[in-house]
Image: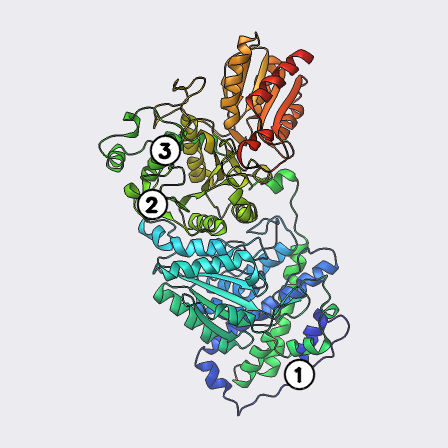
């Protein structure tokens, strides 16, 4: 074995492998031939070895590209090549969500599908080349639509919740003929590292899998932990992964030496067969090694001893497979060396070609896949009628439009029912959504009408709820999950930001997560519940590229905007957040108690509300009030009081926080020359900042002012009024603006 010097570079590993082969003599007395033949034919063994060799040389090439300034990603799979056995144990149609060190799996899956360009694709990704087929040079990922591998964007296990979601919804999708690319008896595979296994996202997903299986529900999911016992430089406690995950009574545990191809293949087959036959989850624990540092710039010897690295090198899975083939008489020593060098030359030529490819050209090129918009197609989809017979069967003797006027919650409820009728792929779920009908009754009655397959309760974990939604979307559903309160979303925001909203960007829209996330939010509940039930921060949503943010202020608009969001999910694969103002759920009056002006009859064919289009109340020429959600009702009430003082105002209901109704903003601002933004979110990071920026960018030079909530959490009780916008604040700001203009 080569000496390990202070660098422990690719050359060290390369030389150790070639030296091992030069020194090796076949052991004819060993049982290698029988052992190999018990699980693999010689041809299949060579195919797996080729995938391992290719993965190793791709790592070498990526490091060399980086040294030349031509490559931009060097997290490699060296030491993890035993995951090729997992690919061999699965069907090529089984969805696979891959760890960033699962390169050999990716290459074996490509072999199974007769896709010869996988090595080229990996190198195009490392070179950030525009014609890389999955992400188009936006990131180096293992992903491919024809190979059934959605690209993963995270290194901390945030893809595990959506793996649970995919597995959970496979049977449901098959029942209604969705996603025919994935056969009904498929297994979903999700691989990750031992360090990621400790992340709350991963532990929550594995807990959810066990919880679902405990209830006797189908969950054909294979977790694969590639355990190299270190996360960057932090050690995983010896024995922790086995101790933590072998004891789960609802998830079958399998273990193997991932550096031993035969042992890994036997265990992977047993695990995959168990999941496929039982439709229950399993946890495959592969002991592997990490050869090199974490990535190209990381020096392993800064935190690992020479003795430890020598021990790791002695377990090299590629060398182990080579030795197996030698002892089994499949290849001679010279043939192994020749194969190794031929693969080096092949990959080097591909790398040279990848480095010569064009990168992304400009900002428009980069941003192309983020948020495709097809307004005409969405409008046509909204206009597509619901089958009247199916609708009558769903609602019974009395249709929703035959009922008395409804407040906002009633309109959302009836619209959700119509969406269940119109779209068999719609599923509505969340904590308390089904039997209780939601904390505020918004989903009441939908379980009884649609059944538990399409309307169901989840466990209390927002990461799981959103993961279920992402996974459901990837097998053809249109999920409408509910997050019970806006404050609760913060525990799971990466499922929106890092997983759902980014997938189109990292896959050039080849994979999508169409969904509408309903969130009860904002404040103005008369101080009830304090911060956790009155959160008014939406900055995290505004910072997510491509995310649609709907924020209705009244019932008819809420129904119309929900129809638009679902149609946009169907047509463009859009991800929407539907922010529902809790304080207006049951509000029926506008100006006086009993006037009923904030209730309306439900209209299943109401006027279409396109994305980014607001609505104006009044035609006053003195002042424009711009607001959304609760602020619209408050502004309309103030508008009436201003009229009594001789000030003619108008109110623009933005309706959409993103995409912002910029044309309406400018038109209504220019109509009066004075703008007061009424922003119930916070002064810092709130919506008003975006409104001001939009108006300034469009050249508006008139007077502008705002009233916004303070940069504070919401306290309990009447003290909430000290930090929230009041109608008195709005009126005072309007009068001040008129006086100083």
Q: Are marks 1 and 2 in contact (CB under 8 Å)?
A: no
Q: Is residue 547 left or right of residue 66?
A: left
N-term mark: 3 or 1: 1
Q: Could you say whether the residue bearing mark 2 is in a helix, strand or loop?
A: loop
Of the pair 533 and 151, the residue shown nearer to us? 533
| Mark 1: few/some/many CA within 10 Å (<14, 14-19, 20+) | few
Residue at (39, 27) in percent of width and height: 407
Quadrant showing the N terminus:
bottom right
In the displayed structure, would residue 243 be above or below residue 440? below
| Residue 271 occupies quadrant | bottom left
Rendering coords of residue 328 (x, y %)? 52, 84
Callout 3–callout 2 Cβ contact below 8 Å: no
Judged from the image, the secondary structure of the residue bearing numbered disc 3 is helix
Q: Which is nearer the eye, 396 or 421?
A: 396
Q: Determine which of the numbered discs, if any, sits on residue 415 in the image.
A: 3
What residue is disc 2 on? 435
When the figure is inspected, residue 158 is found, relative to residue 623, above or below; the finding is below
The residues bearing labels 1 and 2 have C-alpha atoms spaced at a distance of: 69 Å
Q: Position of residue 10 (x, y in %)?
A: 70, 69
User: Is there CB contact under 8 Å for labels 3 and 1?
Assistant: no
Query: Which residue is identified by label 1?
Result: 22
Can you give x and y, in whole percent of width and height, for residue 381 in the image? 39, 33
* Position in image of residue 349 (x %, y %): 65, 62
692 horizontally vs 112: left or right:
right
Which label lies toward us, 3 or 1? 3
Whether residue 146 appears in this view of the structure is no
């Amino acid at each position: 074995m080569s000496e390990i010097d202070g660098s422990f570079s690719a050359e060290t590993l390369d030389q150790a492998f070639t030296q091992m082969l030069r020194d090796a003599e076949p052991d004819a007395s060993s049982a290698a031939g029988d052992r190999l033949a018990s699980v693999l034919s010689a041809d299949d063994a060579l195919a797996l070895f080729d995938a391992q060799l290719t993965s190793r040389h791709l790592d070498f090439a990526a490091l060399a590209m980086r040294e030349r300034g031509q490559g931009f990603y060097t997290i490699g799979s060296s030491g993890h090549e035993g995951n090729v056995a997992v690919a061999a144990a699965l069907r090529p149609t089984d969805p696979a969500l891959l760890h960033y060190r699962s390169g050999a799996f990716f290459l074996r899956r490509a072999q199974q599908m007769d896709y010869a360009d996988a090595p080229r694709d990996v190198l195009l990704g490392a070179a950030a080349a525009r014609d890389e087929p999955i992400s188009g040079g936006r990131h180096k990922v293992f992903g491919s639509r024809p190979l059934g591998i959605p690209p993963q964007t995270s290194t901390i296990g945030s893809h595990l919740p959506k793996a649970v979601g995919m597995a959970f919804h496979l049977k449901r999708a098959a029942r209604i003929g969705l996603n025919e690319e994935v056969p009904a008896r498929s297994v979903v595979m999700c691989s990750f590292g031992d360090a990621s296994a400790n992340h709350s996202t991963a532990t929550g997903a594995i807990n959810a899998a066990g919880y679902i299986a405990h209830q006797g529900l189908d969950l054909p999911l294979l977790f694969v932990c590639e355990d190299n016992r270190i996360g960057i430089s932090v050690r995983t406690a010896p024995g922790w992964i086995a101790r933590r995950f072998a004891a789960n009574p609802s998830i079958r545990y399998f273990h193997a030496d991932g550096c031993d191809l035969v042992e890994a293949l036997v265990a992977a087959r047993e695990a995959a067969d168990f999941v496929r036959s039982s439709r229950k989850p399993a946890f495959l624990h592969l002991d592997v090694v990490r050869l090199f540092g974490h990535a190209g710039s990381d020096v392993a010897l800064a935190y690992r001893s020479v003795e430890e690295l020598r021990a790791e090198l002695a377990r090299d899975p590629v060398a182990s497979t080579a030795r197996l083939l030698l002892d089994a008489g499949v290849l001679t020593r010279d043939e192994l060396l020749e194969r190794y060098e031929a693969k080096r030359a092949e990959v080097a030529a591909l790398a040279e070609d990848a480095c010569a490819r064009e990168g992304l050209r400009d900002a428009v090129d980069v941003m192309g896949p983020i948020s495709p918009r097809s307004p005409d197609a969405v409008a046509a989809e909204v206009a597509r009628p619901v089958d009247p017979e199916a609708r009558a069967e769903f609602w019974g003797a009395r249709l929703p439009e035959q009922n008395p006027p409804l407040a906002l919650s009633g309109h959302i409820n009836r619209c959700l029912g119509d969406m269940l009728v119109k779209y068999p792929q719609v599923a509505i779920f969340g904590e308390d959504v089904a039997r209780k009908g939601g904390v505020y009754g918004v989903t009441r009655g939908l379980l009884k009408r649609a059944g538990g397959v399409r309307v169901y309760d989840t466990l209390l974990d927002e990461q799981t709820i959103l993961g279920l939604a992402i996974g459901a979307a990837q097998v053809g559903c249109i999920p409408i999950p509910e997050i019970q309160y806006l404050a609760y979303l913060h525990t799971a925001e990466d499922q929106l930001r890092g997983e759902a909203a980014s997938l189109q960007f990292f896959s050039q829209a080849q994979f999508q997560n169409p969904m509408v996330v309903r969130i009860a939010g904002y404040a103005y509940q008369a101080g009830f519940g304090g911060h956790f039930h009155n959160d008014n921060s939406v900055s995290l949503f505004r910072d997510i590229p491509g995310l649609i943010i709907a924020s209705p202020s009244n019932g008819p608009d809420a129904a119309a905007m929900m129809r638009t969001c679902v149609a946009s999910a169907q047509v463009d694969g859009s991800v929407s957040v539907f922010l529902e103002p809790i304080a207006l759920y049951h509000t029926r009056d506008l100006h006086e108690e009993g006037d009923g002006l904030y209730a309306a009859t439900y209209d299943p064919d109401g006027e279409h509300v396109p994305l980014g289009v607001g609505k104006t109340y009044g035609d006053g020429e003195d002042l424009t009030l711009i607001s959304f959600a609760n602020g619209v009702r408050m502004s309309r009430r103030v508008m009436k009081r201003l009229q009594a003082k001789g000030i003619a105002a108008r109110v623009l209901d933005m309706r959409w926080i993103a995409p912002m109704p910029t044309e309406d903003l400018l038109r209504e601002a220019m109509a009066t020359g004075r703008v007061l933004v009424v922003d119930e979110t916070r002064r810092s990071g709130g919506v008003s900042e975006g409104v001001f920026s939009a108006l300034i960018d469009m050249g508006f030079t008139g007077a502008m002012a705002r009233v916004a909530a303070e940069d504070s959490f919401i306290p309990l009780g009447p003290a909430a009024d000290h930090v929230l916008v009041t109608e008195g604040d709005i009126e005072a700001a309007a009068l001040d603006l008129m006086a100083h203009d």
